[in-house]
Image (cartoon, grey):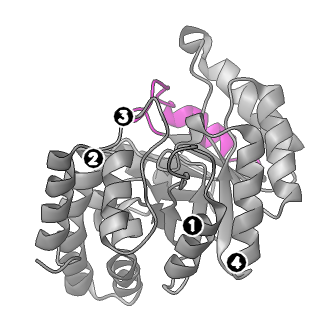
Amino acid sequence: MIDLSGVFLPVVTPFLPGTGELDLPAMKDNLRGWSKFPIRGVVVAGTTGEAVLVDEDERLLLVKAGREVLEPDILLTVGTGLESTRATIRLSRKVADEGADAVLVQPPAYYKGAMTPEALREHYLAIAEASPIPVIVYQAPLRMSTLDFPTGLVAELSKHENIVGIKDSRGKLELMGELVDRCQDGFQVLVGSGAMLYPALEVGAVGGIVAVGLMAPAESCDLFEAYQAGQSAEAGRHQRRIGPVHNDVVGAIGVGGVKAALDLLGYRGGDPRPPLLPPTKATREKVRVALVRGGLLDG
């Protein structure tokens, strides 16, 4: 069983100015910087990585670049959720061949009305049977036009040995607690909001896939380690520091805001890929103020 305990960073995808092609050297530089911190892993081609705007062959290049610079103990998870079961299986097998450790699979949403619990169950079980690496279910109804998984469905999926966890970005602790209580022993719940990392650990999550960790990797990892050591006051202190940054940048602005923050912090963010628009000057100033208030950037 793969151990998902800890902080995962859903990394951004840098693009070259002008052409909009992948900037793989920038990607590698970013990964080298983040890997200096005690993160559990990274997620390539997630929501913050603009997965729906990145081609399938580009995802493979990102995985290859990541595997070239990351140490084996840093888990490399890749977003492979596509609209068809067939395509998701194909991509999951390909990223496994490039060295990915796990796949993060969002549900298909184009035919949302037809995505009954039965349809989703068959979709995920087929992927789990075919994928050579573990599958993590992605629950993110607040960020995409997707579906809210019934707890009973997730509990059923948790019985499959190759479905090892879920990223829950719903932002509701009571629902996360239901997952922890009702899913199979060993099934691992990861929180998707940096504003809830500490309370999520309190209700039984094993860690988080948190975009605020891109901007505050030390603080996010320190929070997790303090919690593990039973230092609740210290963990709470770190949560109070990173929570507002999540709300002001990740929650209020999104991908463009995260990338602007990374530019300010010495990483390679750049502009998002169209149709996403680059942040305005006013938005960049809001990002700068949020980083200064969080103690992540000198004023």
Residue, disc 1: 26
Quick one: label 1, few (<14), some, or many (20+) residues within 10 Å? Answer: some
Quick one: label 3, few (<14), some, or many (20+) residues within 10 Å? Answer: few
Among numbered discs 4 and 3, the one appearing first in the sequence: 4
Residue, disc 4: 69
> What residue is rendered at 76% in x and 26% in y?
122
The residue stretch that appears in magenta = 140-160
Gap between marks 2 and 3 measured at Cα: 10 Å
Q: State the image quarter where residue 262 is shown.
A: bottom left
Residue, disc 3: 142
Gap between marks 1 and 2 measured at Cα: 25 Å
Residue, disc 2: 251
Q: Can you say whether 86 is above or below 268 in the image?
A: above
What amino acid is found at the position of numbered circle 4 in the picture? Val
> What residue is rendered at 67% in x and 20% in y?
118
Q: Quadrant of the C terminus?
A: bottom left
Among numbered discs 4 and 2, the one appearing first in the sequence: 4
- Describe residue 187's horizontal placement relative to residue 101 as left or right: left
Q: Of the numbered discs in the image, which one, if any, rests on residue 157?
A: none
